[in-house]
Amino acid sequence: MIIPIILILQFIEIISSASNPRLLIISLDGFRHQYLKKYPFETLNRVEDEGIKSKNGMQPTFVTMTYPNHISIATGMYQEDHGIIHNRFFDTNLQKIVSFDTRDQGQWSDAKVEPLWITATKQGKRSAVLFWPAAHNEFHGTRPLIYSWAYSDNISMREKIDNAISYLRENVVELVMLYHFEPDKQGHIYGPDANETHEALIRLDRDINYLLEKVKKELNDDLNIIILSDHGMSNTVRTVQPFREGYVNRSSVGENILDGTLFSVTPRPGQFEQVLNGLRLIPGVKAYKREEFPERFHYAKAVNRLGEIIVVPDSEGVYFSQATENVSVAKGNHGYDNILPSMQAIFMAKGPDFNRHIEIDSLKNVDIYHIACKILNLKPNPYAKAGSIDNLTNIFHLRANHCSQIFLNMSVVVLAWFLYFTMDI
């Protein structure tokens, strides 16, 4: 009777694993979707073919920058709702600058804002958040079980993978969210089409293969994996310096200015029309009153963090600088209109709770929160209204049916062995 008992124990282990799904979300900063079409990737192409593939990539939120989009991915909210509208900005309510490095200084005072790892923690799921923006912040008295207290570019992708898999292997956590700074770094320095950027992409492809081998060996392939990015990358073609070029007098606006791939200022009292009209003289851009900024961007309601005027270029590749002296600008940039092909991010997924060989047209990064909640059997934050899974139901594998089939198959085996030994006796 020893063999049937062993089979029963194995069956219990399988059912236990199936009822406790695990998820790893990996973000590769600045991995433009068009890279997947431009270059062959041995591992990433295999992940797409075996699991879920997005034909046209994943649409980021506006502005297409790193900090705002990682919070949109984590919360399922637009930037005007979660409040992170730039990589660095001044909050007039807090009277403080908020950036990647800002500790717990009130920037998350809105109780409606809840990242995935907080949703999971509240519902009894343990999380590890590795270098993801805001991982080091407390949300309304709650933190994940494991998180990176300080960010560093000195940690290799493989070291991050080793840490993630060790937490999952030892059943320490059910959710891991892992951020890596490449290929964004190379895209900025050398441009999206440079050999150095391509080399970084190939290295990352090998790193993902390293991950998959560890998942197969150490987790028996029992892990749901989502690989995504926050935005794309574009060549910088033009620098605009509104103060240096005389479109606006620097003394006409307040100290809190947003620049980069958009430009936002608050004119001093009595200077509004003069500043607005001056900015509208810049060729190839559009200057809006904040309240008239296009609704499709879901951006302008964060009034305590934006200027009263918002300027955006008509086409990608323009970079705004508030500097009054000549500046040198990175060869690659992002932050442009979130419908542009060059700004689209990557998305692919595989694992026991995802269907196989499925191609979708596209999705939005605010859908990721809801996909993760579905995988982990979590009740989503009711304020995460920007995304949904209504049009993504075909990507999921019905684990209940899978478990039923396992139960049926194992029951047949156990029964066969039981009858064999009974008849033998």
Image (spheres, grey):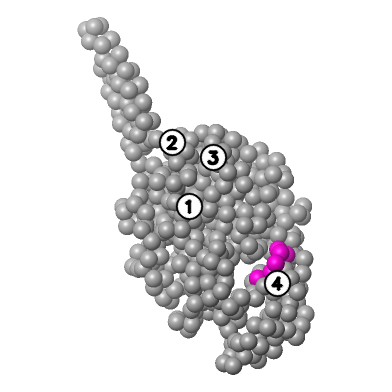
Residue 127 to residue 223: above or below? below
Residue 3 is covered by the magenta coloring: no
Q: Nearer the viewer, residue 82 or 181?
A: 82
**Three-letter amino acid code at disc 1?**
Asp
Disc 4 from disc 2: Cα separation:
46 Å
Q: Earlier in the sequence, mark 2 or mark 1?
A: 1
Disc 3 from disc 2: Cα separation:
11 Å
Left or right: 168 as drawn, with respect to 265:
left
Residue 19 to residue 61: above or below? above
Q: Nearer the viewer, residue 38 or 309?
A: 309
**Three-letter amino acid code at disc 3?**
Ile
Looking at the rendering, which quadrant does residue 39 occupy? top right
Quadrant of the image containing the C terminus: top left
Proximity of marks 3 and 2: CB atoms separated by less than 8 Å: no
Q: Which residue position is annotated with label 4?
A: 285
Q: Earlier in the sequence, mark 1 or mark 3?
A: 3
Q: Nearer the viewer, residue 143 or 85?
A: 85
Q: Residues within 10 Å of mark 4 (few under 14, many from 20)?
A: some
Q: Which residue position is annotated with label 3?
A: 52
- Start and end of the magenta stretch? 312-317
Q: Main secondary structure of the magenta part?
A: loop
Tell me the element at label 3. strand
**Three-letter amino acid code at disc 2?**
His
Tell me the element at label 2. loop
Disc 1 from disc 3: Cα separation:
14 Å
Residue 116 to residue 401: above or below? below
Q: Which residue position is annotated with label 1?
A: 367
Residue 314 is covered by the magenta coloring: yes
